[in-house]
Image (tube, rainbow, N blue to C red):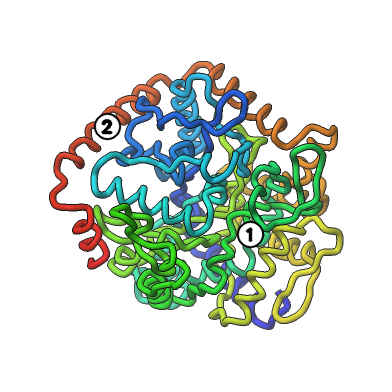
Amino acid sequence: MSVPGIDRVFERRLASLVNSGEPQILQGGRKGVEKESLRVTPEGRLAHTPHPAALGSALTSEHITTDFSESLIELVTPAFAHTWELLQYLLDLHQFVYRHLGDELLWATSMPCAIDGDADIPLAQYGSSHVGHMKTVYRNGLGLRYGRMMQAISGVHFNYSFPLPFWEAYAALRGERSGGSGFVSASYFDLLRNYRRHGWLVLYLFGVSPVVCKSFLRGRNVQLPELGMGTAYEPCATSLRMSDVGYRNRNQAGLTVSVNNLGEYVHDLQRAITSPHPPYEALGVKVNGEWRQLNANILQIENEYYSFIRPKRVARSGERPTKALRRAGVEYVEVRALDVSAFDPVGVNQNKLRFLEAFLALCLLKDSPPIGIAEQAALDANHLTVARRGREPGLTLERDGRKVPMREWARELLDSMAGLCEILDRGDAARPYGQALATQAAKVADVALTPSARLMSELASGQSFFDLALRMSETHKAYFLDLYPPNEERLKELAGEAQESLLAQRRIEASDRGTFDAYLARYFAD
């Protein structure tokens, strides 16, 4: 960057890692994926069938659950040290799910299938327990606040934590006595700030939602040009999902959550989940004995806060996310900006995940001063600009108070990642991280190589987005069902987990005591 000192800070830190005497210092970071997909009928309509029992309990299953809707399956991988292991597990999950879907399909794109409106989207159901009822009430509240259609959008979340040996070496080069939880948390917040500064690059490189089915816009005050029958689009968009058309929440536009440090982040979230919001009060909380939302605060719970990236820690049973962060600090980050790719059967690929791993290292190592209100407004605008106009020729973004060409800035960031990819590639003659970086550099050089441009090219023949997405969904189903040889050991393991999760749900339901109102009061008093 042109700001004095920032490149020198990064180069000094990178050189220290290179010379640390530990050649594989960045290798072995833990990575996992959460991938959402709508279940649809063979005709591409939203499935109204219950979450298949053979997949287990959506409440207690560790790897196969649901998100907002009963029809929105979420597949969760464990954390792996190697990307290929993660992708193999995700593939096995898809194969297992498809064995129990009958004639239904998993919709292949982020933007939803043909939906008749909010009433057509069933809320996820988690059984009769207090915790299960709370999850459904929370989702009902989301639907009232933002509309169910927005909640039907799918995405891919990438979870990442740096390897433990890295923290010891990084603490030493930063002059810290130990790489304890305080230092680790502060470093992750350095990363979070820089992701806010540079994360628009992820939308340009991987956004693949420049179009929507017109049914998605029904009843909403959103105007987009038509692209043939049944399809609306933004001519130069990369990710309408991550724009104000999609998942970016206008209702939260006035909500500011600082990532300058852990204390400010937790404070801002706590304030949001304890501050009443008059428009939500007007919706009612408990009406005629029925819970409509968990409360009338700006956020019902922490997870309602929409963000491109979140600091995370695995919570203990019944522990709230902010309490887990206060207890032991940041454990990993969750990147939430990835669209589901119709061009990858599992919605994501190794090149993308390897690039993200190196990109997160870049965000960690670059100098990361605090973000003020004015800078945050400019960063938000950059993300929105790239989401809606990222392929526009000559596009400029705001950096340090001045306009700079987006592609020039993108090349600068990618050039800075070369050394990080060399560290990640040490000992591997195939240089997979370097190859992943080269693949992304080609997209910056030629916008036609971006997945959003590729999707537009696929639609140039005149077919609708709906027809393309349905065809890709059918292709993916055939791919998984025809895959040979199947990983029978993994499939058996997943079947066993499904049965155990059903038993676990029954145990929770049998152990419930008292009323739901009392349970909710205890949860929020904690």
Which numbered disc flags the more N-terminal residue, 1 or 2?
1
Q: Establish if 17 lies above or below 228.
A: below
Q: Quote the CA–CA distance across marks 1 and 2.
A: 48 Å
Q: Which of 97 and 119 is in front in this view?
A: 119
Secondary structure type for disc 2: helix
Residue at 67 percent across and 55 percent down: it is 203
Residue at 55 percent across and 34 percent down: it is 46
Residue 526 in which image quadrant: bottom left
Which disc is residue 419 wearing?
Answer: 1
Q: Establish if 255 lies above or below 45.
A: below
Give, as a three-letter code, the residue at label 2.
Answer: Leu
Residue at 34 percent across and 59 percent down: it is 294
Of circles 1 and 2, the one toward us is 2
Residue 66 at x, y percent in the picture: 42, 40
Q: Nearer the viewer, residue 175 or 119?
A: 119
Residue 481 at x, y percent in the picture: 53, 19
Query: Which quadrant holds the N terminus?
Result: bottom right
Q: Mark 2 points at which residue?
A: 502
